[in-house]
């Protein structure tokens, strides 16, 4: 089975050059939880050099919390922020003549649209207004999967190579110590189980059905480089 490996980038860590050789798609911050126009341009150029597909990584406009907390803002404010982020990203990609392959919401927004159908519909609608052909990365069994399919949008099932799951397929919150997997061997076992059996082992000790066409390794994982190298050696990339 050929799979895609993606990573969140452009978040000010300056480690993109270490990760890009080992991934096949990337999610680039659009300036509201992290990043800037200059960083976007730099990461887009690096992706182009490595033949890595690029995606927009929009978020709540919340640098203070890195987009990892749900913001109390109106739907109008959120819609405008998302639209502005995606239009800016499209503009930067167009300047380098590279197509935008996908969109992947970031952090708290990603987790929210997995469970909230109304917010999921808003995100899908904004994406479709800005991009005609971009795909959307979604978790298996989520509300945004349902909405995107209903609206005729192409989805890509995503699982997290370096995150632990609960029985309901929600991610273990980053506030808990066991949220992030940093050991490369554990990540490999986690990914191989999903690839070979379409199952994920939860922190409750159970196995749950899951589908994945792309796996994310977070750029801010302290062992991201070694994890990606191990995955690159052990699995077949698209």
Image (cartoon, rainbow, N blue to C red):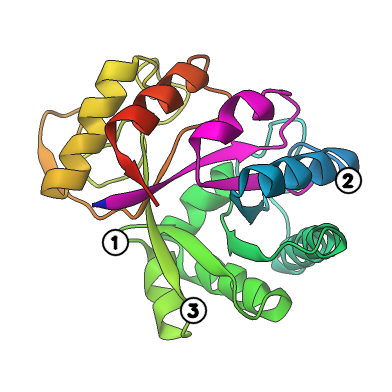
The reply to whether the magenta stretch includes residue 110 is no
Q: Within 10 angstroms of label 1, few (less than 14), some, or many (20 or more) residues?
A: some
Disc nearest the viewer among 2 and 1: 2
Front-lying residue, 126 or 204: 126
Residue at the spot 29% in from the left edge and 61% down from the top edge: 141
The reply to whether the magenta stretch includes residue 15 is yes
Give how far apart the Cα atoms at labels 3 and 1 are.
16 Å
First reached walking from the N terminus: tag 3 or tag 1 = 1
Q: Position of residue 67 (x, y in %)?
A: 66, 39
Give the structural element (helix, strand or loop) at label 1.
loop
Q: Position of residue 215 (x, y in %)?
A: 39, 43
Front-lying residue, 52 or 125: 52
Q: Which residue is mark 2?
A: 37
Give the structural element (helix, strand or loop) at label 2.
helix
Q: Which residue is mark 3?
A: 153
First reached walking from the N terminus: tag 3 or tag 2 = 2
Give the structural element (helix, strand or loop) at label 3.
loop
Residue at the spot 69% in from the left edge and 66% down from the top edge: 99
Front-lying residue, 16 or 59: 16
Disc nearest the viewer among 3 and 1: 3
Q: Which residue is mark 1?
A: 141
Q: Within 10 angstroms of label 3, few (less than 14), some, or many (20 or more) residues?
A: some
Q: Is residue 156 above or below residue 17?
A: below
Q: Which residues are magenta?
A: 2-30
């Amino acid at each position: 089975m050929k799979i895609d490996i993606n990573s969140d980038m452009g978040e000010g860590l300056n480690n993109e050059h270490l990760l890009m050789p080992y991934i096949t798609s990337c999610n680039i911050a659009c300036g509201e939880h992290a990043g800037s126009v200059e960083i976007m341009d730099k990461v887009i150029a690096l992706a182009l050099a490595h033949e890595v597909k690029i995606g927009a990584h929009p978020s709540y406009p919340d640098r203070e919390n890195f987009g990892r907390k749900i913001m109390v803002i109106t739907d109008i404010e959120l819609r405008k922020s998302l639209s502005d982020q995606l239009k800016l990203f499209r503009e930067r990609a167009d300047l380098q003549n590279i197509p935008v392959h996908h969109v992947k919401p970031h952090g708290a927004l990603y987790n929210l649209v997995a469970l909230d159908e109304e917010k999921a519909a808003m995100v899908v609608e904004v994406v479709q207004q800005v991009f005609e052909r971009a795909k959307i990365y979604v978790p298996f069994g989520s509300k945004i999967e349902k909405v995107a399919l209903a609206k005729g949008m192409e989805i890509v099932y995503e699982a997290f190579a370096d995150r632990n799951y609960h029985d309901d397929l929600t991610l273990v919150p980053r506030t808990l110590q066991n949220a992030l997997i940093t050991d490369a061997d554990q990540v490999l076992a986690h990914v191989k189980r999903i690839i070979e059996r379409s199952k994920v082992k939860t922190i409750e000790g159970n196995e749950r059905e899951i589908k994945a066409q792309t796996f994310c390794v977070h750029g801010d994982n302290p062992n991201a480089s070694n994890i990606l190298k191990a995955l690159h050696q052990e699995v077949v990339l698209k």
